[in-house]
Structures are given as C-alpha cells and as structure tokens.
Image (cartoon, coloured by chain):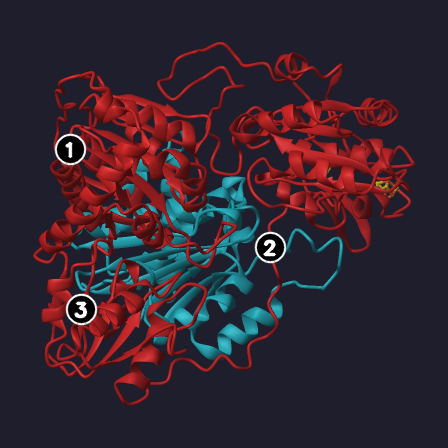
Chain colours: A cyan, B red
C-alpha cells in the first residue's frame, strides 16, 4: 500500500501518539513506514504536524504538497493551515472544536473555527467530528487522538484493518486506560462508518 | 530486532552497535535524543554523560579517544562553536580510538540562532564529514565514520540536519551490543602534547592524508550517480531525499549525490560530471558543493555551467523541501507544470500561534517581579538561550537582547560600562549558568562591574526536553550526585549579595529586586521554582464573583490560562497550574485557589 497521512493540531493534543500508533499499525500490516515530527520551540502551544508515509518509495520524510491521501486535523484552523498537503480527492477528518491561540485574550480576533470548517467543506471531502460531543462519555478530550483514528478506520480511509490498529493502541496506552481507549476507538469507528464510501 | 526510531535514535543505536565506549554531549535541538537513546538502551560498560557544555564534552571524549576508546560526542551546530577550541587542535593531534562528533545542523533555522553549515567547519578544521540523507543511512554511516576515524586517526564530523534527526524509520539493531575492548593510553609526549613543531609536521601530514581520504571517498557506497542526462543535479544530505522524491518520476535525470562533502571526493565527482553541460546544486545552509565543483572545474579545465545558490536558482537561506525543489527542477529541466493542487488562494486568515511561556511557568513570575520593581527606571534586560527567551513576548517584554549561551551576563556588563545610569540585568537559566555563565560572573566581579544577575532556576534544562544538569543532583548514568549549589558558587566567586527567592511569591520577589538594585557591585537573585512541565500542579485557581472584568490580570502577565469567555474573565482549568501569580495581581481579590475536595 502507498499512503501519505498527515496529522496536525496544536502542541499538547496527543498528535504524536496517534502518529506512532498509525506507523506501527502500517508496519504490522506489512508496509514500509517513515514518519516525521515537528519538535522544538513549536511545541509550546504552537502548531504541530506528524507526517506518516506508508509505502517504500517515500524519500522525503515530509509529505510533498498535494500528496496526502488523508489529513487528521485535531483543530479547524490547523486543517486549513495544512490543506496544501492534501491531494485532489483526498479526505480531511477534522475536529470542529477550535483551540484559541494562547494570545487570544491579549488581542481578541474572535476566532471560533466556523469559518475554517465552511472553507474546508467547500474544498474537499471533509468529515467534521464534534470532539466535545464525542469525548463527553469519556470525561476528557484526551482520548480524542484515539477516537479520530477510529473515525478514519470506520470510514474506510485508513487502509489498515481495525483490529491491527486496536492492537497497537492497546500496546501503547497505560493498562488502566486500555478500556477507555478501546471504547473511544470504537465510538470513533461507529461515527466513521456513517461516512464510509459505499 | 527492528526498532522504529527517529534519526537521532538511529545514530545512538549505531554507536552502540559500533561498540562505543564513551558518549558525551550537551543538549541542543535537534541533537538531544542521541544521548538520551543511548542512556535508554542497555549500555553496560559505556560511560554516558551530559557534559556541562560542548567544549567539556569534546575534551572528555578526546582523552578517551587517546586511550583507544571509541567515543561519540553530540551537540547542535552552535554547540560546535563552543567546542571548536578543542576540536581545531584535536584535528592536529589526532586520535587513536574512533571519535565521531555529531553536530546537528538546523536549516530554517527552526530552533537555532544561526544557519551555519557544519560541512564548512569540517573543511576549516581539515577533518572528514559524513552527511546522511535518512535515519537508515545515518545508522549505516556511523559505522563507516568510526572506521574512517580509526584508519586515519582523526576525529570525524557527522552532520545530520533537523529533518533527518526527527524523521522516524525502522532500523535493524542487534539484540546485544558490547563496548569494544581498547588498549588504554600509551604515554608519548611527542604525540599527545601539542607544540608548534608537532602542528607544523601534522599540518603537512593532514593535507596529504586528506587527498587520500578524498580518493577513498570517491568509491564510497553512498556517493552515487543515477541517470545519464546532460543536465545534472547535485545534492547531499536531506536535499538528496527531497530531490529524489521529485526525480523518482524522471529517472533519466542525472542525480549526483555527495555523502562525504569533505574531503571532497574529486575523482568521483569528475567522473560523474562526464558528459554534463550544466549542473544544478541543491543544498541547504551554504553553497558548499557548488563552490567545490567550481574549484574542481577550474583546476581541471572543465567547462560547465554551475547553478545553485550563487546564481540565485536556489534560495540563499532557509529550508528546502520537495515542493520548493519541484518548482526549481521544472524550470531547470523545462518540465511541464505539475497537475494543479487544491487552490488555496482564497483561504481565510489563520490564527497565529506564537510560542509562549507555559501557563504557570515560574519564569513569568520572575520577569514580572523585576518589571514591577523597576517600573519607571532605566534598565537593560539581557536575555539568554532557553525557554526564558520567550520573556521577550508581550505583555512581559522583558528581553532586550539575546545573543548566545551565557552572553547575557557579560553583555549586562557592557551596558553598564556604556551607561552607568541604567541598571543592567542578566537573566540566565540554571543549565545555562553552568554551561557558560560562571566565567561571566567572575569577569563582572574582577572588573568591578555593576549588575544584577537573575538566575531562573527551574531545576532542569527545559527547552531541549528536560535533561538533568549539575544543579539537579542527577546525572545521565542515573546516579544521585552532589548538587552543585548555585548560591554557593556565586558566593565563592565573591558576591556578597545573593538572595534566593520563590518567584511565585510576588511581594518577596519585588522586595529582593529592590534590595539588590539599591546596592553597588554584582548582586544575584536566584528565582527558584521547578518547571511546571515536570512538576505536577498543586491545584487550580478560579475567578470568583468579585471580578470586575478590569482585565488587569490578563494584560499584566499574559498567562495563557487566563481567558475571556463572552466578556467574562475566566481561568482555563485544563491549563492553569494554580501558581497563584494572577491572584497576587488582581486588585479585587477575585482570584482564589479552588477548594479541593479530598
Ligand atoms: S494561577 Fe493564574 S497565573 Fe497561575 S497558571 Fe493559573 S491562571 Fe495562570
Ligand atoms: S484582575 Fe481581577 S478583577 Fe480584573 S479581570 Fe482579572 S480577575 Fe477580574
């Protein structure tokens, strides 16, 4: 399989774990994988991206513009910021919950994400997930990174069998959170199933 | 076994696989994970240390290398400036055990002060350098670098760039590694003591040897040519990966890759250029290959058009990418435009997300205390390298200068000597204090300067990922060690006024600053409170009904946890660490610690 998946969000949202699980799952599925993380200054409340490149003819660790099959965006404006990576016909799965810039209280820009979502809807195959709604029953938004993998898998946009992804999740989360993570993944998969290409 | 690791991890594992005996380094993005990887994997019999700075790391390793041990020294590119004193001389003296010095370059720059190019440093120091294009290659090349170092008895540079350091790949790593047995130091002052006569003789030897190494590199497995076209592309390091990504669809294009930039593999390049009429050099940081090829052609009477940074075909600064190269290649090779990507010209304006100090960061409180205490007085605020450089941002605006590690302390003195009316402050972190701050304090005392040194002691090296340092009482071998006490060091240097204060106690901190400002000479305040990223928050604060929405808390300190929701001032519980700084600013007593039900 050849697939480029970009994960983006804001520092602290758990994008790195999602990218590690994806990379590991693709390897278990028998593919060559390369990935890259943004690390450093940018991590402190700044935009973060993980590039996951599946297949053996990936040379650049970063996905070239216009090549990503799938973008998993943890935040609406970050989806737009990285839309240049999406290929024509690619899918964006985006969390509708905005993360206001930490400087927002100092200079109010009124950013609430809605403008970003309508822009995305007009530009590409876009699956909008209400992360707040989805996370309610888990009591914390920190399972969103697992849930969005579920959405992608359920919607058939991942190209990796769900059991494999679930197996890699279980391997990587602390034992006492295994059940909640599994439930988050399954919940995501259910939501994703509504968007499955028939 | 297969390990999925980042490029830095691959470098660390490769050193273990090569039987490294001693590893030393100083943290710096993008190089820090190399030492951390080695410390994390089994490494019995290998000495691993975070040294106090890069110069120390290089010297510790040099002695081990004199003894025949295999050593690895790691740093970021500006760290190599600090270590350049021992390295330049070591190049003349040479080594016995293999010595690989990793200096990670940072095109962009993404998290560095400069866009310097370690390949230039190799040429300057007259020592070989390897330039990997991927984590897999980095893993393979480390072994080659040790072979080269031992064969020619020279330290060898190894320069990955950020995108190689932070890229992940699967690496085949042996189940078990063992440090290589070595002979030990054999005394020979004619060999190990650098004197002008030795330098003279060895300089001649090095120049002759480098020609030999260049020849050997000419058949090195990673110096490759693909394609046969008359218009060629030359690339090295990550630029090769970007070039290959685009040119994989154009296999005819002659792609020449130089993995060993110095000594330049002349025979290889000459052969690779046969039948070529025009060459485009794609590289980051500096036009190194471009200049080498120009010299080579000049010396050999080869007629060739050489394009690159010097001709404006490739940007002079900043990172390259596959996208950027696609445009450059299309123009150079007369290729049709690529199929249109999604048109994003009508995208809405995106919110900016500049880096800021974390919510509850004690540095914010320290800066604020100084600002408050010195309000209305002329001051110079000299910053330094670390998280606290972010003290420059609004609304704190407490960082007037930032040059290089440790410079704040000495620059404060320079401001004092040019303006005795102003009060000169230097802000330095605890790790930076040990790395290169102490000598600056001695300089101040010795020369009778007047300044206030603020040590922002958060008990870690926060910016680069929380490495231990001499003040933390822990080292990289996991030993509990004697803490080096910053106050005692300062008193030992001769400071008579050294105050330690908790920055989260605003009144006490302001008082300490005022006290120091009233005294002559060199004074120091140690603002001591742990980094919020490593200590679990003790509680949260909330805004109560007394709030009149004056907005003072927000505009004074700009803590990211202080927000406005529908015009009402609130605290974001998910961010707040309960540091209590804002509660000491609110004039209405409207911010209080949340009741914790136990
Ligand atoms: S107590 Fe106030 S200043 Fe401290 S982290 Fe919470 S909101 Fe920020
Ligand atoms: S300073 Fe106090 S009164 Fe003013 S907005 Fe902040 S919490 Fe409310």
Observer-nearest residue: B142 or B127?
Answer: B127
Residue at mark 3: chain = B
Q: Nearer the viewer, mark 1 or mark 3?
A: 3
On screen, residue A131 above or below B512:
below
Asked whether residue A167 appears in the rendered view, the answer is: no
Report crowding for label 1: few under 14, some 14 to 19, many 20 or more residues within 10 A (C-alpha): many
Asked whether residue B313 appears in the rendered view, the answer is: yes
Q: From the top left corner, tell me how far across and down residue B501 is, in percent.
A: 74, 20
Question: Could you tell whether B178 is left or right of A9 in the image?
Answer: left
Locate the N terminus of chain B by quadrant: top left
Residue at mark 1: chain = B
Q: CA distance from mark 2 to mark 1?
A: 46 Å
Q: CA distance from mark 3 to mark 2?
A: 45 Å
Residue position marked by numbered label 2 in the rendering: A99
Quadrant for ligand 2 reads top right
Question: Could you tell whether B414 is left or right of A59 in the image?
Answer: right
Q: Which mark is residue B18?
A: 1
Residue position marked by numbered label 3 in the rendering: B256
Same chain for the residues under marks 1 and 3 in the image: yes
Observer-nearest residue: B123 or B517?
Answer: B123
Element carrying mark 3: strand
Q: Quadrant of residue B26?
A: top left
Question: Could you tell whether B133 is left or right of B360 in the image?
Answer: left
Residue at mark 2: chain = A
Q: Nearer the viewer, mark 2 or mark 1?
A: 1
- Taking the spot 71% from the left edge, 40% from the top edge, the residue there is B414
């Amino acid at each position: 399989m050849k697939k480029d998946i970009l994960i983006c969000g804001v520092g602290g949202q758990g994008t790195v774990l999602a990218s590690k699980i994806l990379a590991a799952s693709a390897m278990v599925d028998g593919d060559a994988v390369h990935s890259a993380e943004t690390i450093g200054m940018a991590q402190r409340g700044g935009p973060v991206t993980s590039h996951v490149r599946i297949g053996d003819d990936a040379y650049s660790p970063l996905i070239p513009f216009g090549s990503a099959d799938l973008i998993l965006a943890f935040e609406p404006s970050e989806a737009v910021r990285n839309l240049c990576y999406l290929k024509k016909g690619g899918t964006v799965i985006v969390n509708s919950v905005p993360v206001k810039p930490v400087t927002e209280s100092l200079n109010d820009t009124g950013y609430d994400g809605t403008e970003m979502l309508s822009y995305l809807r007009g530009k590409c195959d876009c699956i909008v997930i209400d992360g707040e709604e989805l996370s309610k029953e888990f009591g914390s938004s920190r399972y969103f990174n697992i849930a969005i993998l579920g959405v992608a898998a359920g919607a058939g946009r991942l190209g990796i069998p769900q059991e494999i992804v679930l197996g890699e999740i279980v391997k990587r989360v602390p034992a006492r959170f295994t059940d909640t993570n599994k439930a988050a993944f399954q919940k995501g998969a259910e939501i994703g199933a509504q968007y499955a290409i028939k | 076994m297969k390990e999925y690791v980042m490029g830095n991890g691959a470098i660390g594992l490769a050193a273990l696989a090569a039987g490294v005996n001693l590893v030393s380094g100083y943290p710096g993005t993008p190089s820090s994970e190399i030492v951390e990887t080695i410390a994390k994997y089994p490494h019995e019999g290998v000495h691993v240390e975070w040294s106090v700075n890069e110069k120390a790391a290089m010297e510790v390793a040099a002695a081990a290398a004199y003894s025949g041990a295999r050593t690895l020294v790691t740093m970021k590119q500006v760290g190599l400036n600090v270590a350049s004193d021992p390295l330049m001389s070591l190049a003349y003296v040479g080594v016995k055990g293999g010595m690989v010095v990793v200096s990670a370059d940072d095109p962009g720059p993404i998290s560095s002060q400069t866009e310097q190019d370690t390949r230039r440093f190799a040429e300057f120091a007259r020592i070989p350098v390897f330039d990997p294009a991927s984590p897999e290659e980095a893993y393979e090349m480390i072994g080659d670098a040790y072979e080269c170092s031992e064969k020619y008895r020279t330290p060898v540079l190894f320069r990955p760039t950020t995108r190689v350091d932070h890229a992940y790949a699967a690496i085949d790593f042996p189940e078990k590694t063992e440090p290589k047995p070595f002979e030990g130091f054999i005394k020979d002052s004619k060999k190990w003591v650098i004197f002008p006569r030795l330098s003279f003789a060895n300089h001649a030897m090095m120049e002759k040897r480098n020609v030999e190494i260049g020849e050997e590199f000419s058949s090195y497995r990673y110096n490759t040519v693909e394609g046969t076209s008359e218009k060629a592309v030359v690339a090295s390091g990550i630029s090769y990966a970007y070039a290959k990504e685009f040119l994989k669809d154009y296999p005819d294009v002659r792609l020449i890759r130089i993995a060993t930039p110095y000594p330049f593999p002349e025979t290889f390049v000459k052969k690779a250029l046969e039948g070529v009429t025009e060459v485009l050099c794609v590289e980051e940081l500096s036009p190194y290959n471009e200049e080498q090829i120009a010299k080579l052609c000049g010396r050999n009477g080869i007629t060739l058009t050489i394009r690159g940074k010097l001709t404006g075909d490739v940007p002079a600064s900043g990172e390259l990418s596959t996208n950027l190269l696609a445009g450059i290649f299309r123009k150079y090779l007369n290729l049709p435009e690529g199929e249109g990507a999604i048109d994003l010209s009508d995208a809405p304006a995106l919110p900016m997300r500049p880096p800021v100090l974390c919510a509850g960061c004690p540095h914010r409180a320290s800066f604020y205390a100084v600002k408050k205490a010195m309000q209305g007085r002329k001051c110079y605020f000299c910053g330094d390298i670390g998280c606290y450089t972010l003290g420059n941002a609004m609304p704190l605006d407490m960082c007037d200068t930032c040059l290089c590690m440790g410079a704040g302390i000495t620059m404060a003195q320079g401001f004092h000597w040019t303006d005795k009316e102003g009060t000169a402050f230097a802000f330095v972190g605890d790790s930076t204090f040990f790395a290169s701050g102490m000598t600056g304090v001695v300089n101040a005392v010795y020369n009778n300067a007047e300044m206030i040194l603020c040590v922002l002691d958060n008990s870690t090296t926060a910016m680069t990922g929380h490495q231990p340092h001499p003040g933390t009482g822990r080292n990289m071998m996991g030993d509990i060690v004697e803490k080096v006490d910053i106050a005692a060091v300062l008193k030992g240097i001769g400071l008579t006024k050294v105050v330690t204060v908790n920055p989260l106690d605003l009144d006490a901190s302001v008082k300490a600053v005022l006290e120091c400002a009233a005294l002559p000479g060199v004074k120091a305040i140690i603002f001591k409170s742990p980094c919020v990223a490593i200590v679990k928050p003790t509680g949260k604060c909330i805004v109560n009904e007394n709030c009149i929405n004056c907005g003072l808390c927000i505009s004074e300190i700009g803590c990211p946890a202080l927000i406005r929701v529908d015009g009402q001032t609130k605290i974001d519980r998910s961010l707040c660490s309960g540091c209590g700084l804002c509660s000491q600013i609110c004039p209405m007593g409207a911010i209080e610690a949340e009741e914790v039900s136990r």
